[in-house]
């Protein structure tokens, strides 16, 4: 099997070495070279073309955003932004996603064995997802990743025999997305009217980037968009984005829906996990919920969407043609979890229609 060829572009020798060690540990990935700035990267690309580039943002001679813009306009190659930027620089990283970067990962941090292992899995998954995006001329079918051990939503929210409350006057919408989801969510949310049903979204994104992502969406949408905080109410006209590195659950107290933001193990290799959000919606909203699963690598959310459907919720999956990576929606469809399979531009209208009485 042909390996995914990766070029690492970062001005830090320590980061280049750490990334090479992490990526080389995966049998499906081959690091074909590294460069300390975009000029050296361009020179290397004259002799060998990578399948994926990992790209730092802050570098000498030319910054990563400028290089990304040139690359996407002249010779599109899937790019994963590798950045240690936190709140101060997260707007820059969000800009990178707008310009065509597939994903964002944190630079490796030397710490506990658990942190390094979690980073390795997430980084390698990001590379594999990027290699299968539609910026490639010849898109290969997504391969199912089967780790040695992958926790389910039971790790955070065990299954319950209790049923959700009967139908109420308020509908709740829960959405899950991963690779390609940043722009898919923009298209979806920009199409919603200001009085749309309350909504909770899990977009796989690193810690400290979700605040800027939510702020950007808030500036272009009629609905209010914010990063979720523990105990935030889910109300009409408001969209809550799960914070990076925290699971976000839908809960209910009487007639009030709210979110619980909590720590916990990786579920379906992610934190936040779509499966965790969807299971909580199944438990606490039942037939009062609408679930939407969008573009993304892997299968996070597929089982949760099925649980939602079985509890009486209406469910939607994004179709293959409009997905950057048809992984998560495809897995949900194969399980029979989707009531509707729709192109991205039609999902918002259908959600509004389905949530009317």
Image (cartoon, rainbow, N blue to C red):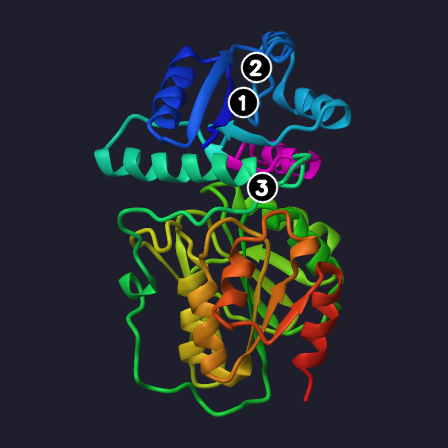
Residue at the far bottom: name it. 166
Picture coordinates of residue 227, whole percent (x, y): 53, 54
| Pointer 1 residue | 56
> Does the segment drawn in magenta span residue 231?
no
Residue 249 visible? The answer is: no
CB atoms of marks 1 and 2 within 8 Å = yes
Please tell me whether mark 2 sits on a helix, a strand or a loop.
loop
The residue lying toward the viewer, choosing from 349 and 25, is: 25
Which residue corresponds to mark 3? 140
Answer whether residue 34 is visible to the viewer in this image: yes
Residue at 36% x, 31% y is 26
Q: Residues within 10 Å of mark 3 (few under 14, many from 20)?
A: few
| Residue at (61% x, 9% y) in the render | 47
Which portion, as a residue range, is magenta? Answer: 87-104
**Do the residues bearing badges 2 and 3 touch, measured as CB atoms within 8 Å?**
no
Q: Residue at 54% of width from left, 83% of height from top? A: 288
The number of discs equals 3
């Amino acid at each position: 099997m042909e390996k995914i060829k990766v070029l690492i572009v970062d001005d830090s020798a320590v980061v280049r070495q750490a990334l090479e060690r992490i990526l080389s540990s995966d049998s499906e990935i081959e690091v074909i070279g590294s460069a300390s700035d975009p000029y050296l990267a361009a020179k290397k690309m004259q002799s060998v073309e990578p399948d994926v580039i990992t790209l730092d943002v802050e570098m000498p001679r030319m910054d990563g955003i400028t290089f990304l813009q040139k690359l996407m306009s002249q010779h599109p190659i899937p790019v994963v932004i590798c950045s240690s930027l936190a709140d101060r620089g997260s707007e820059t990283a969000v800009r990178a996603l707008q310009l065509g970067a597939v994903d964002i990962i944190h630079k490796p941090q030397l710490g506990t064995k658990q942190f390094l292992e979690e980073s390795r899995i997430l980084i390698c998954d990001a590379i594999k997802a990027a290699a299968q995006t539609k910026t490639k001329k010849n898109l290969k079918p997504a391969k199912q990743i089967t780790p040695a051990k992958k926790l389910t939503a039971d790790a955070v929210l065990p299954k319950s025999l209790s049923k959700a409350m009967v139908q109420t006057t308020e509908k709740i919408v829960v959405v899950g997305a991963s690779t390609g989801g940043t722009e898919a969510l923009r298209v979806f949310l920009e199409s919603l009217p200001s009085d749309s049903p309350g909504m909770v979204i899990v977009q796989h994104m690193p810690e400290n980037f979700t605040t800027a992502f939510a702020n950007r969406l808030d500036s272009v949408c009629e609905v209010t968009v914010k990063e979720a905080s523990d105990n935030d109410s889910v109300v009409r006209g408001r969209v809550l984005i799960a914070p990076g590195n925290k699971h976000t659950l839908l809960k209910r107290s009487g007639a009030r829906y709210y979110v619980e933001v909590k720590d916990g193990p990786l579920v379906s290799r992610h934190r936040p996990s779509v499966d965790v959000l969807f299971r909580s919606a199944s438990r606490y909203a039942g037939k009062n919920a609408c679930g939407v699963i969008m573009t993304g690598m892997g299968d996070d959310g597929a089982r949760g969407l099925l649980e939602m459907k079985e509890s009486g919720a209406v469910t939607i999956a994004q179709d293959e043609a409009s997905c950057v990576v048809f992984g998560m929606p495809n897995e949900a469809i194969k399980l029979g979890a989707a009531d509707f399979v729709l192109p991205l531009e039609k999902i918002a209208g259908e959600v509004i229609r389905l949530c009317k009485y």
